[in-house]
Amino acid sequence: MEKEKEWFENWFDTSFYHILYDYRNDDEAKLFMNNLIGFLNLSQGDKILDLPCGKGRHSLFLNSQGFDATGADLSVNSIMHAKQFQKEGLSFEIHDMRNPLNGKYDSIFNLFTSFGYFNQESTNIKVLENFKNALNKNGHIVVDFLNLHKVVSTLIPEQVIRKKGVDFLIKKRVTESFIIKEIDVTNNGEVHHYMEKVQALDLKKMKQFAQAAGLEIQHVFGDYELNPFDAEISDRLILIMQ
């Protein structure tokens, strides 16, 4: 019997996912990348892995700034889209971050809450170990996660969003272990059900995972302008590890 797909294998491969999150624009991506490039003091030609990369907007920008960028993602549709942009110093591949990486990189970027998707906390440690094993000496790992405290304090239990003629009924809840988002998509009279389930992780947990993977969190930021992290008000939890 075929194994049932994980939620992220279904949801991220749909056009609806990209419609719902179309506000993640290139300007925001460029701001974050430029700030990281400056803070990490990256050099032209450095090899950067963007995992998962979605349709590749961060990888494209990094390549335009002179870096050797590789974008990887579990979503076949996203990688097929991104491959049209491949050229010297820019490549895309299908990869599950739970599996070991083949290449070696100067920096590995894990962006836009692409961590904690899995049912077991031990899998988070395995992912970080895979990153560490693919890192060149003195390289950096960047994990851009949500700020759990703010997500919980500002949670909207239910809302309807309409975009491009598609209705999204979104219901959110937080359990002891997970932030769960149920998404009913109505399109052309048909209803499709998807979900997002991300582990409810805070800075304390992230430090535990990093330590277990043999990594050290060196810097913690709270937004894409790299302002200091404040659990009460920060939009993001951005970790720089080595």
Image (cartoon, grey):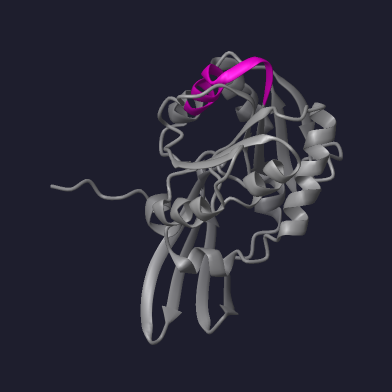
Residues 66 and 3: in front is 66
Residue 57 in the image: above or below residue 111: below
Q: Is residue 231 left or right of residue 199?
A: right
**Looking at the image, how many numbered discs can be counted on the residues?**
0
Image coords of residue 167 (percent x, y): 51, 80
Quadrant of the rendered image containing residue 98:
top left
Residue 41 in the image: above or below residue 184: above
Q: Is residue 139 left or right of residue 129?
A: right
Q: Is residue 150 left or right of residue 121?
A: right
- Which part of the image, by quadrant, shows the C terminus? top right
Residues drawn in magenta: 127-140
* Residue found 41% across the figure and 39% down from its top: 119
Quadrant of the rendered image containing residue 100:
top left
Q: Residue furthest front?
A: 88
* Residue found 60% across the figure and 64% down from its top: 21
Q: Residue furthest left?
A: 1
Q: Is residue 202 visible?
A: no
Image coords of residue 241 (percent x, y): 68, 23
Q: Is residue 138 visible?
A: yes
Residue 238 is one of the magenta-drawn residues:
no
Quadrant of the rendered image containing residue 204:
top right
Image coords of residue 179 (percent x, y): 54, 50
Residues 123 and 36: in front is 36
Residues 219 and 84: in front is 84
Image coords of residue 94 (percent x, y): 42, 42
* Residue found 51% across the figure and 80% down from its top: 166
Residue 39 in the image: above or below residue 76: above
* Residue found 43% across the figure and 81% down from its top: 187
Residue 25 in the image: above or below residue 129: below
